[in-house]
Image (spheres, helix red, strand yellow):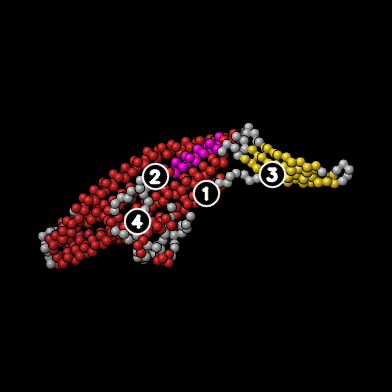
Amino acid sequence: MSIRSATAALGLAAALLWPRPGGADPSRITLQDVFALAREHAPALVEARARVRAAQGPLASAAPLLRENPQLDVQVGPRRLPNGDHGLDLALGLSQPLELGGKQGLRREAARAGLSMEEARLRDAERLLLGDVAAAYLRLLQARERKKLVDAAAEAAARTVQATERRYAAGDVPAVDVNVAKVAHARARAEAQVSAGEIHALREELEVRVGYRAQPRVTYDDDLRSLARAPVRELPDNAGARADLVALEQEQVQAKAAATLGRRQVLPDVTVGARYQKEADETVFLGTLSVPLPLFARGQEARLVGEADATRAEQELAAARAVVPAQVQAAKFRYRASLGALGSLEEVLPLLDDNEALAQRSYDAGEMDLAAFLLVRRDTLEARAAWLEGLLRLALARVQLEMETGVLP
């Protein structure tokens, strides 16, 4: 998940020209479009991408054959000879520091591990982000379907009020039935208003996560049942470990290399060179060797910090390797239970329409009182709402399972 702008507002042109999978309607954003937009614009990935670019610096620094540049030293000045004449003293030196003990190789190893670690963290950030975005998108779809359900219930309640008023005028029902029908209508309208507000709120939350502000006329549209019933995708056999485990493995490699580098500081780095010296009429060529004595600075800090980091990374990796299979197993249990629960609800869906139609005819014929009729309608509404909740629960369980296994859309 290059750093891309996290600016939320992109304008209508971007919405219209954004490439859609399969040439889809540009006024319709599907789940796959949301994933693409999140990868492009999500603020959660900005820092991770910046860390990857920053980790390329140490690798570039450790890439050359030698860490330090050669140094050119020039000394020049006049000299007064014993006979009173003036001469010139000139000294030219060229020296090159050399690291011993494979320190440059250890720096390359630490830098490569650091870059691999940040790249794995970026992939893990993308994994978590896409799971979060998918959950927000699914909740938005479910809220949209629930809005349709409560709108239909409000319309049915309005018709019931009219029917009850007619029957009251004919003397078939008492006045209390009219009041009960109006109360039921008011409750249905209130639920519709709450559902409409929930859709707007969930859309805002989704767009904050994605980092993309769609135009009001653009709709987020998918079939919730198809997404819930989609088969669980699995990682290929050669996919390797989950990204967060890879990041911990590389962090351990980096810390071990840093600790080894600290221990190698007891080996002094030498500086070799050549020197040309001219004093009046005398010329001297010298070879030079400089060896610092590691009496005080012996890499204590690098060694201790590296060893502590390596131990911490090793312990975190061991804990994560034990936790990840449990997370995957828990997600599998939740998915299977949600799948079975949805199947039980879908078995009775055909009965709901029959119950509602039968209850409506019975009430219209005077064979059922209003309280019983409203109870049947409320039970039908709650059953359909439970089915929508079951779809959402199954879809979320599938997303969680794929996220725990490390599958990326």
Identify residue type, mark 4.
Tyr
Identify residue type, mark 1.
Gln
Counting from the top left corner in percent of width and height, residue 362 is at 12, 60
Residue linked to disc 1: 56
Counting from the top left corner in percent of width and height, residue 121 is at 44, 47
Q: Earlier in the sequence, mark 1 or mark 3?
A: 1
Which residues, given as a range, are shown in magenta?
247-263
Counting from the top left corner in percent of width and height, residue 288 is at 70, 39
**Contact check, label 1 and label 4, Cβ < 8 Å:** no
Please identify, in this view, whether the residue under mark 2 or under mark 4 is nearer the observer.
2
Q: Earlier in the sequence, mark 3 or mark 4?
A: 3
Counting from the top left corner in percent of width and height, residue 27 is at 36, 65
Residue linked to disc 2: 240
Identify residue type, mark 3.
Leu
As drawn, is 272 to the left or to the right of 21?
A: right
Say which element carries label 3: strand
Residue linked to disc 4: 137
Mark 3 vs mark 4, CA separation in Å: 66 Å
Say which element carries label 4: helix
**Contact check, label 2 and label 1, Cβ < 8 Å:** no
Identify residue type, mark 2.
Gly
